[in-house]
Amino acid sequence: MKQKVLVSAIKKIVGAELLLSAAFVPVAFAQTAPTDAGTANPDATKLERVEITGSLIKKADKTGNTTVQSVSAKEIEDSGYTTVGDFLRGTSANDASSWGQTTMNGTAPGGAGIALRGLSEKYTLVLVDGQRVANYALAVNFTDTFFDVNTIPLNIVDHIDIVKTGAVSQYGSDAIAGVVNIITKKNYHGLEITSDLGKAQHPGDATGTFGILGGFGDLNADRYNITAAASYYRDTGSRLSDRDMSSSSDFSRFPGGMAQPTGPNQQNFWQTSPTTTQALSPCPPGAIGTSDSTVCNYNTQHNYSLIPETTRLNAKIHGLFKVTDDVQAYADFWVSRNETVQYSGIASATGISNVFNLVPGQLTPLNNTVPAGNPYNPFGVDTPINYSFLNDQTAVDTVSTYWKASTGVKGSFSVPKFGDWDWDVQYGHSQSVVSSTYENTLNVNAWESALANGTLNFSNPVYPAGLFEDDNQSAISKLDSVTATTSTTNLFTLPAGDVGFGVGTEFRHETDIINPTTLANQGITAPARIQSVDGERNIAAVYYQFDIPLIKNLTFTQSGRYDHYSDFGGAFSPNFALRYQPVSMLTTYASYGRGFRAPTAVENSQATFISHQTLSDKNAPGGAQSIFASEYNAGNPNLQPEHTKNYNIGFALSPDSTTDFGAAFYKVKIDGVIGTTDPQALLDANDPSTVIRNADGSLRYINMQFQNLGSLDTDGFDFDFRKSLSTGFGTFTLAGDWAYVWHFKLTQPGGGGTQDFAGNNGALNQPFGASNPRWKGNTSLTWDYAKFTTTLTWQYTGPYSNIIADQIGLGGTGSVASYSQFNLFTSYRGFKNWTIYAGIDNLFDKAPPFDPVWTLNPDLTGYDQSLYTNLGRFFQIGATYRFK
């Protein structure tokens, strides 16, 4: 009889799922992660049900799924990181296609995101306290929307959950690669002050941090609690000239490195014919003429930021109020102001400089022809000049302001025969405003006047008034959301146990506006730094989850979500998962989900932007050569959502309370992936409607538009372990978290072939990609003795093949070496109320591995900026005082 009841219940639930799938699957598909998150110790129990990242149903304890990596505040402190952004970017799950505030000439200056599974930042959803937050107002690489993880003060972080298997069926379409949930401290009592100072061994990069955390009121005794935190962070920054690796433009000491500047904005010369140049005579002060007198070279490394000057102010306050024994109300306010100054080289007027012509909406070349009548033209005929203004430092001063206000009510109730229920209703508004000032851009009319009137002596320059001016850009991203959820762990009872059920609904309004640069958009200044976005939409969703015990220790979880987007329609996202725990020490799990990703406003609105990269032009005048190509990109309102499938299987083994080990296999497939055609392929095809050339045959720009391409297929493995050993000399704990990328394949539509980017840097030519080493991992050894805690951390990034260097004709070894960095951090708690700590990052002062691709204009670092920062050995000392 019990078996009949069980079978009948399963049939009803599966039948309902099939009915929902039949109704919604023709619209779209979706994916999600296993919904049962877990901790290392399955024997640990808690009386209070808690929220689990990746699950709609609250649980009495976190059991089951090692694909949820939970990092405590103590682990973050022991790592030695001083910001949330730096810590997250160092995790093994953030393995590729992730860009931080140190990226030279980045399109989202000041912001730092995280990209799980190497799928770029738009595929990773970042939550704060389980709530969605507005994205940074500018998109990285012009394409990837992301949340700026620098806006969270580190001292208020309680722990961070990283769901590595996607969670579309609960959270929505931008959770394909996974979810990062930053949980902040609540119900805190007391007051603590933290301050630290840091200094790089090499020039520059002096840092200071000050933070305060306080709270008062006991939720049980006083029926309320107020918890607040504020922090200040300052980094003086550094220049490329401050590190040996990038101190000069001469990279010839490295395999594949060139002996001279590779960007035209580092050179002055006359273009005497399409294939010949002649140095200015004499070269301007500060320039070095070559032995063959063809160019005047500049070393401009001191004009570029290695790490930008940064000032951050963050504050957050959380109020929790006990209305009744079963109902709580809460309110939260959080504000952040970050200013970043990124030095971006010197102004130049070259053969590849473009001006935006507003009326036809096209790029036109900047006039750089010196008339025959100019007194500084030695040739007596009109002659083009490549001119760099050595004394004109350019910079981007970016101020980003972020704030979020939210409120809600949550509680619990019981329904006879239908379980004990938790419920939550909340509203939140958040927004990011980014204002950028581009200092010392070239005024086009003043430049052309100087050419025509001879008011600029090229060899001994005194710049005419009005030749340079500042340009400005502003952007805003807003998010309003209303959510309501309810769940129970015991809806009814089957022979194998209680059935859990949860249901939720969400409505949100998203607005993304990027105003074009004030002067460049009108063709007043150069270069043509153009980016514009104007989009908004409404999203309504309903989602659910069932936890069904099939037999003893075997649980089937089925969840789904239906979203309706005002700009393209509806989509249903189902997920199916199994969790089996035959004994307390072993948990196994598997899941399958279908999903989708809606196009972002950058991709499907009337958006435009101009990007640049080095390509090989086989049709260039005078023969094939590497060129710095401009690409004119446009949004596409006709884009369709990407359709996804997600697979996950793994286990967690805890033979005793001191030992944990886990491994998992993941696979993500994305059909109709949104991107642009490989620009190198477009340039090779040389279609005149796409490849726009100047009268002399040189490339002006490439027309590109977002489109649904073929499929993107990636899979790999995760490994984690922890072992503690107690001795007479203290407790030693060895822990590690590693990731391996097996495949990262892009298949072009219509039989266009397949490229596998795992273990190489071929995805650099794609808007969603970057260098993709197969291995990334962190291993730490912690020693707890008396009042001391000391942690030695090994951070490893694997090697990758340099196929881009081969495509554009660079030399070298054909591969980029692996990288290991060791960090040492220690703290002492032996003084009353005090914790004293100190650390050394990059203990052996190791520079990143050399990559010749990153020596080409505009990237002059010599290493892949998506993977590394050349900070060098860094010292840190600080203290925390807790008032009792």
Image (cartoon, helix red, strand yellow):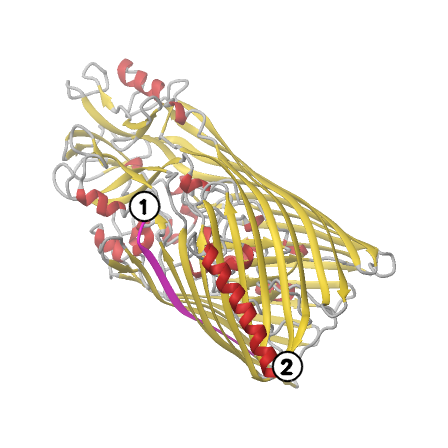
Q: Where, by quadrant of the figure, is residue 388 drawn?
A: top left
Q: Quadrant of the N terminus?
A: bottom right
Give how far across and how far down residue 461 sits, in percent: 33, 24
Residue annotated with mark 2: 495
- In this view, the residue farthest toward the right is 221
Q: Residue at x 28, y 13 (%)?
A: 453
Residue annotated with mark 1: 676
Q: Which residues are magenta?
A: 708-722
- Whether 177 is drawn above or below 260: the answer is below
Count of residue discs: 2
State yes or no: residue 764 in magenta: no
Q: Amino acid at mark 2?
A: Pro
Q: Secondary structure at mark 1?
A: loop
Mark 1 or 2: in front is 2
Residue 500 horizontal side relative to residue 734, left or right: right
- Whether 684 is drawn above or below 213: the answer is above
Residue 550 showing in the rendered view: yes
Disc on res. 871 = none
Mark 1–mark 2 distance (CA, rounded to whole Å): 54 Å
Q: Amino acid at mark 1?
A: Thr
